Image (cartoon, rainbow, N blue to C red):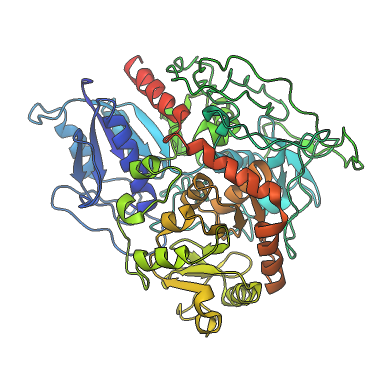
Amino acid sequence: MADGEIIVVPFHSSGHIFPAIELANHLASRNHRIALLLPTTPSDASLHPLIRIVEFSMPHPPGAPPGPPQPFSSTSSFSSSPSGTPCSSFDDFLARRFDGDDPSPPPICAIVDVMMSHLLDICREFQIPVVSLFTSSACCTALDHAMSKLSMEDLGPGRTVTIPGLPEEMALTSQDLNQRPGHPGARPPMFGPDHGGPPPHFGPGRGDVRPPGPPPPFGPGRFGVPPPPLRQGEGGAPPPPPCPGHQEGPPPSPRRGPPPPPPFGHGHCGGPPAPPTSAGGGPHPTPPLRPGDGGAPRPPPPWDGHGHHPPPPPVPGHGHFAGPPPPPFGHGQGCRPSPPPPDRIGPGHGGGPPGLADTEGAIALLFNTCDDLERPFLDYLAKQTKKPVWGVGPLLPAAFWSAAGSLVHDAEVRPQRGDSSVSERDVLEWLDSKPPGSVIYVSFGSIGAPSDAELAELGAGLEESNRPFIWAIQPNAMQHDPAGLPVQTDGSFLEPEGLASRVGGRGLVIRGWAPQLLILSHGATGGFVTHCGWNSTVEALGCGVPMLTWPLHGDQFHNARLVTRRLRAGIALKSGSESVSKDGVLQGIERLMVGEEEVRERAASAREIFAGGFPRTSSASLDAFLDFIHHR
């Protein structure tokens, strides 16, 4: 067992606490004692014996919207003064570790949620190394950082700008900049129990509140399952066009058209690591890899000190790429006229980086993602921060990984949160009665929902689709207008009147908690209308379910673009301030369930990343992280 103890401090909402618990379990399974700071001791969480819970409560940080109070514990608590400076309780917790009376082992380091970054100064006073934890996608933090360097002068109407070191499919438009918090007309970030995004910072001196960051696909090449073949002569198809009403600008493309979608699993233990992108570089290459033999990975070497993402380990039999990258679209038969290339920019435009500014003083960054999904974004963030960056997720319960490829029962994976109008058993019986791949699942998470008008259009589209569907409705969700701004309602609409009675057994409306993993892992489910919260995104990819994306705010827009543009495992139903119509819903459903075969194939391929359980690249990254901590 390692000497000392690792302190893990999550932000106090379930979207942050649950990933932190899983991270603690992974570290404890590697013979490290963990002190996990939580508002209460979870009664039904599966905790490793080397984890001890330290209870304390955190009031609403200054600047955060009002919400339900956090439970207080007599064990310990800390609060914030009006200026946003933490008071002495967390300070006292650390001080007791050094006063000679506390039997706890000395701290090795503190892993602190980036939304709790105001605690970094206290850790520094006690000379405790701090590692910043992002429970969101690396894509969101990378794009937020890139947007912080842009101004509207960089992005005129109709222009797209590629960011050196990031995939060309993720080029930015003026619409993206308009959605950034702090810009006039931007959507406000959301706070709530299921929010897993990157760091809004609370307190003075750090600028505006940043949008929450986002979620991840997977890589099958690692387990010997090749990615879906690319079209010969084209190098891959462009991303499917959005549904009617979608007003986003044209997808970014190089001179001869959009690059092919990256094969899932590129850049992980299936071959040598991709070279770091130089400053002012171009698109991130995505050559296909040879299927592997599933050999055990070696721990990756320690960080090289140059700010690059530590390379994942090679796998026996995976020594080389299968060949050069496929040619870009337009080199083969039937090529289309070439649009002008997107502009490129370098650093130095606009303001300071959101999110990454809150990691100042941290020695490394951990993300709730894996190389198989987001290797280019991890590389970019390491280059920008000049710190080691590891993908150590997805941080889902162990029962999810052990059930990979089979039906997942939520009751066995995680506790039910809140009441539900339908039991998990009833949901299973309903799904068992439907044909394979026929059911559309609709959920916008637990804290957000579209406007009444858009919900009416959604209900009409589901009714006229003549397809079976499950619609999970949260009665207490905050509704949003088409522009993404919160709308004050009494929550009484949320479901079109009489819909359930009109569709009969073809539709199942769940009010309250829904067994999402059961629904997504069931063979009857063929599509997911989703807000693109990071946890929901990862769960859908892990179950191989294609998505119809309908982001509401913040990080969800980045996650939706990751799914539709780069991973191409979904279709955009909405991406901007346009209203969703019944016709758009109908056409989106038909394209997802019938028309876009490549999208369904790529979603199915994503599932293979998790076929062997927790991603081996993330397991190796955890080993490399611990090696880094112990050899500083």
Q: Position of residue 414 (x, y in %)?
A: 32, 52
Task: Classify the position of the N terminus by image quarter.
Answer: top left
Q: Is residue 395 left or right of residue 348?
A: left
Task: Classify the position of the C terminus by image quarter.
Answer: top left
Residue at 21% from the left image edge and 23% from the top image edge: 4
The foreground one among 479 and 67 is: 479
User: What is the residue that sits farthest to the left in this orientation?
Assistant: 101
Quadrant in which residue 527 is drawn: bottom right
- 217 lies above or below 548: above
Q: Position of residue 188 (x, y in %)?
A: 54, 59
Residue at 47% from the left image edge and 73% from the top image edge: 509
Q: Position of residue 40 (x, y in %)?
A: 21, 52
Residue at 66% from the left image edge and 29% from the top image edge: 165
Q: Is residue 594 left or right of residue 314?
A: right
Residue at 41% from the left image edge and 28% from the top image edge: 619
- 473 lies above or below 386: below
Q: Position of residue 51 (x, y in %)?
A: 21, 36
The foreground one among 318 and 275 is: 318
| Residue 554 visible in the picture | yes
Q: Is residue 565 left or right of residue 300?
A: right
